[in-house]
Amino acid sequence: MNAEHASNTSSLPEMPATSTEARKQHAEISERIRSFNEAYYVNDEPLVPDAEYDALFNRLIELESHYPTLKKNSPTQEVGAAPAEGFTKVKHARPMLSLGNAFSREDIVDFLARIRRFLNLTAHSPVEVVGEPKIDGLSLSLRYEGRKLVTAATRGDGAEGEDVTANVAHIDDIPKTLPDDAPDVVEIRGEVYMARSAFHKLNETQAETGGKTFANPRNAAAGSLRQLDPSISAKRPLRFFAYSFGELSESLAQTQWDFLQKVDGWGFVINPLTRRLNDADDIMTFYDELGNQRPDLDYDIDGIVYKVNDFELQLRLGFVSRSPRWAIAHKFPAEQARTRLNAIDIQVGRTGALTPVARLEPVTVGGVVVSNATLHNRDEIERLGVRVGDMVVIQRAGDVIPQVVEVILDERPEGTEEYQFPDECPKCHSHAMREEGEAVTRCTGGLICPAQAVERLKHFVSRNAFDIDGMGAKNIEAFFELGWVKSPGDIFRLETDHNEAIRKLEGWGDKSATKLFDGINERRTIGLDRFIYALGIRQIGQATAKLLARHYGSVTEWRSAIINANQADSDALRELINIDQIGPGVAKDLIEFMAEDHNLAVLDDLQEVLTITDVEAPSVSDSPVSGKTVVFTGKLELFSRNEAKVKAESLGAKVAGSVSAKTDYLVAGPGAGSKLKKAEELGVTVLDEQGWLDLIAAE
Ligand code: IVH
């Protein structure tokens, strides 16, 4: 990892000294990585710079090398995140994997040495690789049967993606039929991307028409490809480079190079900058050349992928967990630029978090004009020593929010002053507090803070929550300002209470107002999981909301269960904490939310205006474990805990973290301890792994 990357990874905790600490740190980092994955792959909104993500991910690998049992259930064994709702899921015939990273010449030399060692070659025998620009877009798998395109699928979690076939119909770079000499089954993989020039144009039109603008070409490509309405996708200028394959009924070539030439002949576009390279020197020359060309390309690249050219060698080299031994991604450093920092503003989030934002003299970084950058929190400002008026170096790593990485002290103007982080909320002037052990400073204004209220409302209507068509952040702000929408329930009364007034607002008319009301009315019926997520309770992300919805089934059940859980030593509390993946921290936030009268009033109000649909366990009532509660314990050998859990849930079972009188089955692997003892005391049926497999296989 180079110095630039290292200087950016301020949040990496110290290496733990004991196995208990290692386990704790592993669990914490895993949770963060999972939420980053979800934000990146599902919501197209990266939360952290690549370098920080990589550092955390590498820490997981490091911990696992000391404590191999941590591998089970670890994000290092998974690729990406689960697919979003709304598209039909497609199981990939061959998984779509990802690549290990290299940052330096040393990493490249290691990569080549590993390959030679594995293949038992001498230190200097040639290993030819193909170097391909690593396009910063989204990977896509195209399946042709009988030479016709039948499915286009996104990567999703690597095993299962989303069916976006209708959305690629207008991508000219994707042939819809293959020539007669193509085999019967062919899967071509590659990257969908948007050219920088097209991205700028799209953003201009979006801004003019009041549509959503995108932070960068990757997000624009993702947002365009993953449109539920294919007619919108059709209007977006997407492109595609082919670089790999999945299932094939017949082999196409013996080398990667020949494969690329072949599909080029079939009408796919292959990247013209692709080269054959023979050793580390060749590789480094190509890396420097491409790095120099990078700012002038009309598409974003974030590195180079090297692949062993010979397929026979690729086959022998195989895979290590989630990535091939025969390929690696050589990352470019994040793109940087210098500019003046004009001001530091404090943004207030929906949970009251105060985030300092640098307002910059606009500057182009990697083809995108940047005028804001995040300063993360108070510590980061102190670490950088940044002052208003400073010249700063900013960095945009592919697809994350730009950040300030360095202050150019030599160019500090006269008369600047040390920045004082506010000790009150800039919006409601309540005291701002930093809790022990937390990096964030929060406004304590709660309900009286208008900034928090607006952010909560924005969250309520956002894509993964109510997803109300026509009700974006701007409209929420405007309606809040006018006093028409103060709490979520007000949204559903706009049509009755402010109908005429909205039609008369500047920029509005009958058509746009009707469209907005239609959008709102369409969401009067909502699933319990989305409903819970939309409330914006601290720590309750989409995944947790889903768990809660599935566990409690209905809004009434969920409400009363959480209220009852506010009693220490109650069954309701035990049940809540017993839900697998719900820890005491999450339970506490939920209980605190439900203990507030004003929150209950919001719930009452919403239940009045909405139909909140129950979530049913998957309709597998004929499965032998449907409706049963299962606990897995001990060292599982036949399957990973995660696989067991996913399987059990798909069969309609609930998976709990600890044994209680409600447990139906305890599946105990070798080394099971206290849970096994407790199950025996309570008379719970205990199965070994094979017993469990037999049970779920039974008709
Ligand atoms: S090969 C098993 N080649 O990078 C190998 N990937 O980190 C699979 N990417 O998900 C990928 N350009 O989205 C490959 N020429 C290229 C690529 C490329 C961009 C992306 C792709 C993949 C990610 C891997």
Image (cartoon, helix red, strand yellow):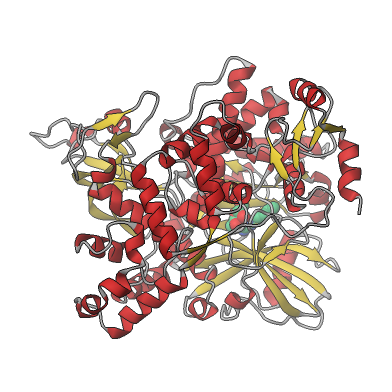
Horizontal side, residue 530 vs residue 250: left or right? left
Observer-nearest residue: 413 or 20?
A: 20
Question: Residue 640 location, x and y as percent?
Answer: 77, 38
Res. 59 visible in picture: no
Q: Residue 432: which quarter of the image? A: top left
Callout count:
0
Question: Residue 70 location, x and y as percent?
Answer: 68, 29
Horizontal side, residue 433 vs residue 190: left or right? left
* Quadrant for the C terminus in the image: bottom right
Observer-nearest residue: 340 or 15?
A: 15
Residue at the left extreme, as displayed: 415
Question: Residue 333 location, x and y as percent?
Answer: 46, 44
Horizontal side, residue 229 vs residue 353: left or right? right
Q: Residue 200: which quarter of the image? A: bottom left
Question: Residue 152 location, x and y as percent?
Answer: 66, 71
Q: Residue 511: which quarter of the image? A: bottom left
Q: Is residue 653 above or below residue 216?
A: above
Residue lying at 81% horizontally and 22% vertically, measured from the top left: 671
The quarter of the rendering in which ligand 1 is drawn is bottom right
Q: Is residue 260 above or below residue 157?
A: below
Q: Is residue 21 above or below residue 698?
A: above
Res. 466 visible in picture: yes
